[in-house]
Image (tube, rainbow, N blue to C red):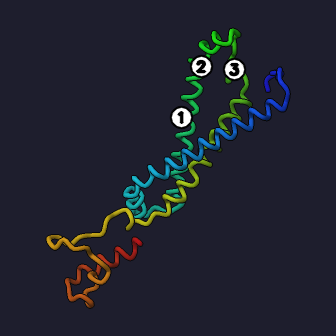
Amino acid sequence: FGGMTPTVGWTTIYGFSAVALLIVLIACSNFMNLATARGTLRAREIALRKLAGAKRGQIIAQFLAEAVLTALVSLVIAVALAQVLLPVYDRFVGEPITFGYTANWRMFGAVCGGTIVAGLVSGFYPALVLSALKPASAHPPLSLAGLGDRVTDADTEPQASGRSPHLSRTAQVRRECT
C-alpha cells in the first residue's frame, strides 16, 4: 500500500489485523444492542409511519441509512482526532509519523468502504427488529372516556355488548394494526 514496507513479519501484521477486526465486530455488536434498545423508544414513530402507509422495506432502509450515516460521522470524528493527536504521539514515540490519507486514495477508499460495511452490518439487526413492530404495540390499550376500563375486542363488537356502534370501527382499526 503506497510504497510502505513492513518492518515486522507478516504473522505480526495478520495478528494485529485479527485483533482490529475483533474490536470492530465488538463495536458493531454494541451498536446493534444500543440501536435496538434506543429504537424501542421510537415505537410510536414507527407505528405512525406504518399507519401512514410506509412499507417494511422503507423502514428498514431508513434504519440502515441512519446506521451508515452514524458510522460515517464516526469515521470523520476519528480521522479528525487522529490528525489532532498525531503530533502528541510523534513526541511520545520520538519519530515523526505521517498520516497520508489524501495521498493514498485506495487505502482511504478501503477505509470508507469498511466503514459503510460496518454500518450496514451493525444496523441490519435493529432494522429487522424495529421494522417488525406492530403499530398496536406502540400504544397502550384505549380507555373509554370517563369509565376508566380498557377497551377489549369483546367490548368493541356492538352486537355482543349492546354498546354504541361507533366502537365497531375501533375494533376494525385495532385488528388492522395488529
Q: 167 or 133, which lies in front? A: 133
Separation of residues labelled 3 and 2 (CA atoms) = 10 Å
Quarter of the image with the C terminus in it? bottom left
Please say if 66 is above or below 13. below
- Residue 165, relative to residue 59: is it above or below? below
In terms of sequence position, does the residue under pointer 3 or pointer 2 come before the other? 2
**SS class of the residue under badge 1?**
helix
Report which residue position mark 3 lands on: 100
Inspect the image, locate mark 3, and give the three-letter code of the amino acid beneath it: Gly
Residue on which disc 2 sits: 83
Image-based side of 22 in relation to 61, left or right: right
Q: Residue 92: where, in percent of width, then height? A: 64, 12
- Quadrant in which residue 86 is drawn: top right
> Who is closer to the viewer here, 25 or 170?
25
State the residue at coordinates (59%, 44%): 28
Q: Secondary structure at mark 2?
A: helix
Q: Relative to 3, is 92 on the left or the right?
A: left
- According to the picture, the residue beneath numbered tag 1 turns out to be 73
In the rendered structure, are the residues bearing label 3 and label 2 in contact, judged by CB atoms less than 8 Å apart?
no
Q: Nearer the viewer, residue 118 or 66?
A: 118
The reply to whether discs 3 and 1 touch (Cβ–Cβ < 8 Å) is: no
x%, y% of residue 104? 73, 25
SS category of the residue bearing label 3? loop
Label 2, label 1: how far apart the Cα atoms are:
15 Å
Q: Position of residue 163 (x, y in %)?
A: 20, 85
- Crowd tier of the residue under label 3, counting other residues whose Cα lies within 10 Å: few below 14, some 14–19, many 20 or above: few
Residue drawn at x 59%, y 13% is: 88
- Give the class, few, some or many, for how many residues have Cα within 10 Å of label 2's Cα (few <14, many ≥20): few
Mark 3–mark 1 distance (CA, rounded to whole Å): 20 Å
Of the residues under marks 3 and 1, which one precedes in the sequence? 1
Up the image or down, 155 lies above or below 143; here it is: below
Which picture quadrant has residue 138?
A: bottom left
